[in-house]
Amino acid sequence: MNPDEEISLDSFFQMAGMDSSQLEALCCPISSTPACTPDDVHISLAEKNSPFTHQIQLTDTEETINHIKARYEAEIANYKKKLSSYQDGQQKQAQLIQKLQAKVMQYKKSSSDLELEVEQLKAELETSNKVVSLLTHSSRLLYLQNRCCSML
């Protein structure tokens, strides 16, 4: 066989010991596409061994890889940005909760102090009321005594 001679894929796969169903599966792996025949694709050995063909295939592959890599890096950057934002939000919420807890404790202490003060003022008021009542009775008693003495 001459190296410049063109061969069909069918001939190539027959020489490799593969049947046409295996060839069809390789040509059209997706079942929704119409089946291709071995005669649809012809590659000359010169084209097959051409460095230009390999370079085009390599360049296409590199572009695909670079595109996928760029998408992957963008997704990672986006994920890291979202994660950082989420963590910042969590940290701010934790700080807010700490501040609120401190305020609650402050208000509880203030409330407790005020309740104690109210109890003390109630006790003072009760004592004052008793003193006023005693003074009123004492004054009345003194008045009555003076009146009795003056009658005599």
Image (cartoon, helix red, strand yellow):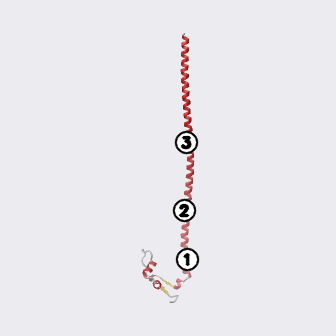
Q: Which amino acid, by three-letter code, is at mark 1?
A: Leu
In this view, 1 is above or below 87? below
Spatial separation of the CA atoms under disc 1 and disc 2: 31 Å
Q: Mark 2: which secondary structure?
A: helix
Classify mark 1: helix, strand or loop. helix
Circle 1: is it few (<14), some (14-19), or many (20+) Cα within 10 Å?
few
Under mark 3, the amino acid is Lys
The percent position of residue 49, horizontal first and vertical second, equals 54, 83
Which of pointers 3 and 1 indicates the residue nearer the eye? 3
Q: Quadrant of residue 10?
A: bottom left
Q: Residue at x 56, y 57 (%)?
A: 87
Q: Return the residue at label 1.
A: 58
The foreground one among 150 and 42 is 150
Give the quarter of the figure containing the C terminus.
Answer: top right
Residue highlighted by disc 3? 108
Q: Marks 1 and 2: which is nearer the front?
A: 2
Q: Which residue is mark 2?
A: 79
Q: Nearer the viewer, residue 68 or 105?
A: 105
Q: Position of residue 48 (x, y in %)?
A: 52, 83
Disc 3 residue crowd, few under 14, some 14–19, many 20+, Cα 10 Å: few
